[in-house]
Amino acid sequence: MPTDPKPTNPTTNSLDVEIKENSNPANTTYAIYNETNGNYIDSTGSATDTPIYQTTSTWSNQTAKNLSINKKYKFSTKAKNGDEKITSNSPKSSGLYTLAAKPINFSSTTITTSSVSFSWNKNGNPDGTIYELNNTTDNKTTTTTNTSTKSDQLDINSKYNYKLRAKNGDNIFTDYTSTNTIYTYAAIPAQVVSSTVTTSSIELNWSSNGNPSSTKYKIKNLTSSTTHTTSTTSSVFDKLDLNKKYNFKLQAINKDGISTNLTNTTSIFTHTTVPTKPTKKSASQNS
């Protein structure tokens, strides 16, 4: 009786099977049985209900084909001598998994100021396949058996690179997907106030609210329909009318060009001029 065969060289849908002769002569023929699927393997590697007997030189590490992705397979063999006498099946081989498939359609689904959610297509992998999301910017990994996950505790309006891979039951990883580059959202500016007001100009200041110094801000003068864009936390609107109410709203823009919601309206009046000193009329002017 041959000893247990050895499965090798996994792909996503095939395994090679090495027959162990156990000192049988070269003219001994063998049949290969897929213990997992309950069928024999024919000379092309396909499944068959009928045992196919060949010498080891003819089998030559026969490939079992059309197997399932990321599934554990075991095999056995049996031998036949020149008198057509057949042994019982060998012991089962140790199990070997086919490879997992590289996930596809890897993309972001939800972005916030501090997190990014992703989803992907499992590409034929069975339930229970482990996926590893790699945040290469922070060198952090997240593992899941779902086809979605979240990366959190991120910085506001910052660039992050992600890639994804799967692994099979023998801990062999697929190649990574292409890198997915994401910018977290900017935060809505806070504490919008006027710092300097004249008869013809208004200077606005605001808090970055955690945005990095490279963040751009768009300030809208709703009254005169003008807009300023700046990377600082202040802006001056000039050439304004005397003693007039101006309404402003403000938003931040992340590095992908995505704007936050607008702030609440901030209303400010320009100053009036100081009245001139009245002059006294002379007696003759009053008569």
Image (tube, grey):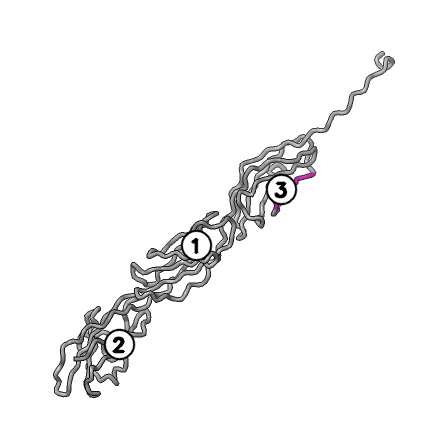
| Residue 43 x/y as whole percent | 24, 80
Q: Nearer the viewer, mark 3 or mark 1?
A: 3
Amino acid carrying label 3: it is Ser
Say which label, 3 or 1, has the lower sequence index. 1
Which residue, as the protein is rendered here, is positioned at the far top?
287
Say which label, 1 or 2, has the lower sequence index. 2
Residue at 44 percent across and 51 percent down: it is: 116
Task: Tell me which corner region of the image, top left, top right, bottom left or bottom right, holds residue 284.
Answer: top right
Residue at 67 percent across and 34 percent down: it is: 197
Q: Nearer the viewer, residue 235 or 172?
A: 172
Task: Tell me which corner region of the image, top left, top right, bottom left or bottom right, holds residue 8.
Answer: bottom left
Which residue is identified by label 2? 17
Which residue is identified by label 1? 108
The magenta span reads 232-238
The residues bearing labels 2 and 3 have C-alpha atoms spaced at a distance of: 72 Å
Mark 3 crowd level (few <14, some 14–19, many ≥20, 10 Å Cα):
some
Which residue, as the protein is rendered here, is positioned at the far right?
284
| Residue 212 x/y as whole percent | 55, 48
* Label 2 element class: strand
Residue at 69 percent across and 32 percent down: it is: 242
Which residue, as the protein is rendered here, is positioned at the far front?
23
The residues bearing labels 3 and 1 have C-alpha atoms spaced at a distance of: 33 Å
Which residue is identified by label 3? 234
Mark 1 crowd level (few <14, some 14–19, many ≥20, 10 Å Cα):
some
Q: Residue 23 carries which label?
A: none
Q: Horizontal placement of 14 versus 34: left or right?
A: right
